[in-house]
Image (cartoon, rainbow, N blue to C red):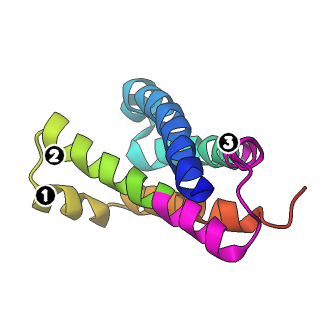
Amino acid sequence: MSALRAAALYFALVFLLGFALGSVRVLLLIPHLGETLAVLLELPLMLALSWWVCAYVLRRVRVPADSASRLLMGGSALLLLLLAEFVLSVWVFGRTPAEHYASYQSLAAQLGLIAQIAYGCFPLLQRGRR
């Protein structure tokens, strides 16, 4: 089950990086630039860091290069990330589940979701890399 261990490590590392960058975005960028522009500035860095973390985890945990293992890793990591985002939204920030899902109507949230889907695809996309 190296793919599941890798998914947990991949999720944890990227979540910590995202929490740190998200704090900077919310506290420093959004008040000056607005939500969408702040997200557009954060996304390239977050995606680059996620790509690098993915490669690191793949090497460290030695996930097999077959598609099934990589899809399991990416899909599980994405599920953990979406679940953590939901839990933070509802339990920490006090939103209802309906409010959380309604927030995806904003362009900034949609851009973030697209980036999260890319994050989930990175293990498979790195399958042929050495």
Task: Check disc 3: other Cα within 10 Å, few if <14, some if 14-19, many if 20+.
Answer: some
Mark number displayed over residue 90? 2
Distance from Cα at disc 3 to Cα at disc 1: 30 Å
Residue 111 in sight from this viewpoint: no
Front-most of residues 69 and 46: 69
Residue 91, position as x, y percentages in the image = 14, 40
Task: Look at mark 1 in the image and give the residue it sits on.
Answer: 97
Mark number displayed over residue 129? none
Q: Is residue 11 magenta?
A: no
Distance from Cα at disc 1 to Cα at disc 2: 6 Å
> Mark 3 or 1 closer to N-term?
3
Task: Check disc 1: other Cα within 10 Å, few if <14, some if 14-19, many if 20+.
Answer: some
Residue 113, position as x, y percentages in the image = 44, 61
Mark number displayed over residue 53? 3
Query: Position of 4 compared to 127: left or right?
Result: left
Q: Identify the element where label 1 is drawn.
A: helix
Find residue 120 and report its image quarter. Answer: bottom right
> Mark 3 or 2 closer to N-term?
3
Q: Which residues are magenta?
A: 52-76
Tell me the kind of residue under disc 2. Answer: Val
Residue 62, position as x, y percentages in the image = 74, 50
> Mark 1 or 2 closer to N-term?
2
Task: Find out whether the residues at labels 1 and 2 contact each other: C-beta distance under 8 Å.
Answer: yes
Front-most of residues 128 and 18: 128
Query: Position of 8 compared to 96: left or right?
Result: right
| Quadrant (top left, top right, bottom left, bottom right) of the C terminus | bottom right
Tell me the kind of residue under disc 1. Answer: Pro
Task: Find out whether the residues at labels 3 and 1 contact each other: C-beta distance under 8 Å.
Answer: no
Residue at 73% x, 41% y: name it: 60
